């Protein structure tokens, strides 16, 4: 049904709704509030000092207005609240003087100061005009919340508007849930705390159930049989024999898992987790080699040009003495380079294609894509990953992540995938000496830097932001100025994500060649950047990063058998001290991720690790784990019953 039949929706509002992704009445009424303003009148016994409250009272005398200066006025009034007189102050609402009189029944919303018996108010309502309850917050910039709420209520009043149930009746009955229709109705106009709890519970359990059904269906789809052609295993072993180090037990185990997967008569769908320096890239190259030896194409997609280019360089080195053709494709290339790559991909001359988001663009036509490898897969949206898979037919998938995922989350996050873990580093890899110092420890830091420069070694200096702010003084640009001034005899360079892609690559290449001593940067170098000469990592404002990111940054040094050091420079807070100590005490990324999960919950943890891991808006895995597992059993039971009913 079209939006224009809804009262209050004209051409301008249709345009605004379309911008927000709302095109039909169905989409409109399913636009759920992101939260609620509680408009509930508090009893005096429940009031907390210095909090925002709604309180009801009676005006004692006509308000007075004082003009502090131009465009700034203060209205003062006395209000009796449950037998006690409070002074109420409201700024820039002097028109209320005409509305409020002695004896007016009012509701005051503002910050309470119980000691002074005063309220600094944001709003003062006549009680007859105050609708107690919950005010939905939708968060659509172009449309005020109240306006959107009224549009939705008008749409719900239309005849013929129906709400389709999304959960099985058996599940609704078992968990004593309200119906989808009832939830929609009260979600946009809740009147009590019970309404609010019913909505939250329904949304949470619905999210869990539909997640599990989707995951179980996806797992079922991956079991469809595919034909496997033989490949030259001798050629694979010859390539592996040229690896200039002894493979770890974990690497040999994962290679065996990959070979088994790629020989089975079903598609591979595997997640490979590995701590920094554990050998994920080599494992990806093994899988790619098997696919190429079968005369098929492989695409490896990375989230940034820097990481994709590094994969390309390693692949070229790995296949240097073979006939395997590696091609690079990125939006940052000039048109001539792009076209040459596109022609080679379409014509089948390209065996192994490495790049960024460009790999799934409309311009790319693959000759015979059969394996997709996605690095740091959580940095891509689900639709982006699927767009690349659709470029081929019956495509095997290998997902890589260097960001350790807590084991308690892994089975939930990747429930439709087989999992491999590289939990062992090469024997020759040295631990990184880690210490944490406060932001004021300038002398200590300069001493560490000077010693590193005297050893002819290079260093990374990382800031969370490009430009300074009130919260972050040590930005990348301000640090660049400081270091360039203080270390005049050293070559200092600045690198960040707002630079031209080619400029970024040039700076990184110069750093790799040893032409730069100190690289001031942001977290753009967090994953995959491999610099042999770098032995010192300094991270400013370390308290603003999660364990996962700090561990990734630390992993940029200590990669080439050289004694290396990492210094976390942090602002002291109640929580920063124990967190920094934990980073100094362990270098096990998986253990750190578990600690981070316990300290901060999955929402903050995943936010730090970028988007894409958990698609939940209403479920908190750390709190809802028990319920989540129970709902999985419900979903499995329902799917089995559905298939049985279909068969019958």
Image (cartoon, rainbow, N blue to C red):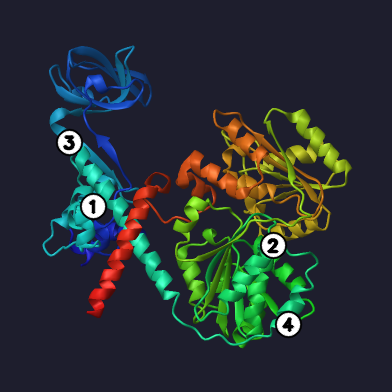
- Nearer the camera: disc 2 or disc 4: 2
Q: Earlier in the sequence, mark 2 or mark 4?
A: 4
Q: Earlier in the sequence, mark 3 or mark 4?
A: 3
Q: Is residue 6 among what the camera can see?
A: yes
- Which residue occupies 46% across, 47% down? 602
Q: Which mark is residue 175?
A: 1
- Nearer the camera: disc 3 or disc 4: 4
Label 2 to label 4: alpha-carbon separation: 22 Å
> Tags 1 and 4 in contact by the CB under 8 Å rule?
no
Residue nearest the observer in this picture, 191 or 276: 276
- In which quadrant of the rendered image does the C terminus lie? bottom left
- Which residue occupies 44% across, 79% down? 224
Q: Earlier in the sequence, mark 1 or mark 4?
A: 1
- As displayed, is residue 252 above or below residue 198? below
- Nearer the camera: disc 1 or disc 3: 1
Label 3 to label 4: alpha-carbon separation: 76 Å
Q: Which residue is mark 4?
A: 235
Residue nearest the observer in this picture, 488 or 239: 239
Residue nearest the observer in this picture, 57 or 142: 57
Total numbered badges shown on the rendered structure: 4
Label 1 to label 2: alpha-carbon separation: 47 Å
Q: Which mark is residue 249?
A: 2
């Amino acid at each position: 049904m079209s939006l224009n039949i809804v009262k209050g929706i004209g051409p301008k509002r249709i345009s605004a709704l379309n911008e927000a992704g709302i095109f039909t009445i169905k989409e409109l009424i399913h636009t759920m509030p992101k939260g609620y303003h509680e408009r509930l009148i508090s009893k005096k016994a429940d009031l907390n000092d210095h909090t925002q409250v709604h309180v009801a009272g009676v005006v004692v005398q006509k308000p007075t207005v004082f003009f502090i200066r131009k465009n700034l006025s203060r209205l003062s009034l006395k209000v009796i609240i449950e037998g006690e007189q409070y002074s109420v102050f409201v700024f820039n609402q002097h028109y209320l003087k005409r509305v409020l009189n002695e004896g007016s029944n009012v509701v005051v919303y503002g910050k309470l100061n119980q000691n002074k018996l005063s309220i600094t108010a944001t709003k003062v309502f006549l009680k007859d005009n105050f609708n107690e309850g919950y005010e939905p917050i939708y968060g659509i910039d172009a449309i005020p919340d109240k306006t959107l709420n009224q549009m939705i209520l008008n749409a719900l009043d239309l005849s013929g508007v129906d709400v389709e149930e999304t959960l099985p009746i058996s599940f609704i009955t078992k968990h004593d849930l309200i119906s989808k229709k009832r939830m929609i109705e009260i979600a946009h106009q809740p009147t009590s705390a019970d309404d609010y709890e019913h909505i939250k519970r329904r949304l949470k359990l619905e999210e869990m159930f539909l997640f599990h059904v989707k995951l179980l269906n996806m797992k079922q789809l991956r079991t469809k049989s595919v034909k496997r052609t033989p490949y030259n295993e001798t050629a694979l072993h010859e390539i592996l024999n040229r690896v200039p180090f002894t493979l770890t037990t974990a690497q040999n185990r994962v290679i065996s898992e990959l070979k088994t997967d790629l020989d089975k008569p079903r598609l591979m769908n595997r997640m490979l987790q590995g701590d920094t320096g554990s050998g994920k890239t080599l494992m990806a190259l093994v899988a790619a080699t098997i696919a190429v030896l079968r005369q098929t194409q492989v695409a490896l997609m990375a989230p940034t040009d820097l990481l994709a280019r590094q994969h390309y360089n390693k692949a070229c080195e790995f296949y240097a003495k073979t006939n395997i053709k590696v091609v690079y494709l990125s939006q940052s290339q000039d048109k001539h380079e792009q076209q040459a790559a596109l022609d080679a991909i379409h014509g089948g001359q390209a065996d192994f294609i490495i790049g960024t988001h460009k790999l799934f663009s409309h311009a790319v036509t693959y000759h015979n894509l059969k394996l997709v490898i996605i690095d740091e897969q959580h940095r891509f949206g689900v639709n982006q990953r699927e767009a690349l898979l659709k470029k081929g037919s019956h495509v095997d998938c290998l997902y890589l992540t260097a960001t350790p995922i807590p084991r308690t989350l892994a089975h939930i996050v990747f429930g439709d995938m087989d999992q491999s873990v590289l939990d062992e580093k090469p024997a020759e890899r040295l631990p990184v000496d880690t210490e944490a110092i406060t932001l004021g420890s300038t002398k200590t830091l300069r001493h560490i830097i000077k010693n590193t420069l005297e050893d002819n070694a290079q260093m990374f200096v990382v800031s969370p932001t490009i430009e300074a702010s009130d919260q972050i003084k040590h930005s990348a640009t301000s640090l660049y100025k400081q270091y360039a001034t203080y270390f005049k005899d050293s070559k200092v360079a600045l690198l960040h994500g707002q630079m031209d892609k080619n400029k970024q690559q040039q700076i990184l290449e110069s750093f790799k060649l040893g032409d730069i001593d100190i690289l001031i940067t942001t977290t753009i170098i967090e994953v995959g950047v491999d610099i042999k000469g770098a032995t010192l990592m300094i991270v400013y404002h370390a308290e603003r990063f999660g364990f996962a990111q700090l561990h990734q940054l630390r992993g940029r040094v200590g990669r080439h058998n050289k004694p290396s050091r990492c210094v976390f420079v942090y602002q002291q807070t109640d929580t920063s001290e124990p967190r920094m100590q934990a980073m100094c005490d362990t270098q096990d990324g998986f253990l750190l991720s578990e600690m981070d999960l316990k300290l901060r919950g999955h929402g903050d943890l995943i936010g730090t690790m970028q988007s894409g891991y958990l698609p939940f808006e209403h479920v908190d895995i750390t709190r809802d784990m028990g319920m989540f597992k129970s709902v999985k059993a419900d979903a499995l039971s329902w799917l089995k019953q559905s298939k049985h009913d279909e068969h019958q």
